Image: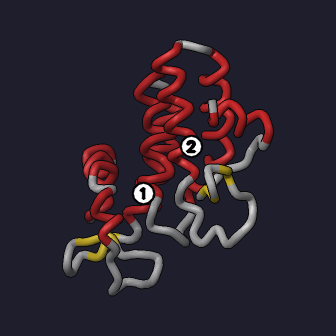
Amino acid sequence: MQLERLVKADPDYFPMYTVQGKWQHGGESWTNWCEGFLVGQLWLLYRHTGNEFWRQQAEHYARLIEPRQNDRDIHDLGFLFWPSWKRWYDLTGDPAINDVVVQAGRTLGLRFMQKGEYLCSFVGPDSCFIDIMNERGYPLFMLLACPEILS
């Protein structure tokens, strides 16, 4: 299984692309927005198999991205924290885990542009990318958890 090989051969590595089916370690990482997808896959494997190995890996890799909850340089916090930390919270109901999800949402909420009612991209306040709209579940969750974002 590819994920098992990845976490054993390249621990703490978050792949972004493959070349001829092999994970690449070099190249520009651009804005580092893919890490949550790996964690989400690990959570899905745990949920599907019940194998504690996958849960341990999911928790470990989630902790590696935890500092990103305050990352104001990207607009993809939903892609980072929804499949990783939110999935973890849904599994456990642990308020400390939810605190990380909420803080990442607050950080993302700082991109909200009242005029136009959108989340701006990392390019600047007058820029909105379509992928931000794909993260709509996260902002909606945040509005319910933190209505003060809009005030």
Q: CA distance from mark 2 to mark 1?
A: 23 Å
Disc number for residue 106: 1
| 17 or 133: nearer the viewer | 17
92 on left or right of 71: left
Q: Residues within 10 Å of mark 2 (few under 14, many from 20)?
A: many
* Residue at 44%, 33% in the rendered image: 87
* Occupied quadrant, residue 61: top right
Q: Are marks 2 and 1 in contact (CB under 8 Å)?
A: no
- Residue at 62 percent of width and 47 percent of height: 66
Relative to 144, say whether 109 is above or below. below
Which image quarter is the C terminus in?
bottom left
Left or right, 25 with reference to 65: right
Chain-order first, disc 2 or disc 1: 2
Q: Position of residue 130 (x, y in %)?
A: 30, 69
Task: Report the side of 24 relative to 69 (left or right).
Answer: right
Task: Read off the residue under disc 2.
Answer: 38
78, 69: nearer the viewer = 78
Query: Tag 1: residue type?
Result: Arg
Secondary-structure class at tag 2: helix
Residue 100: x %, y % from top left: 52, 44
Report the residue at 47% width, 28% height from top: 44
Where residue 135 appears, x then y in whole percent? 33, 56
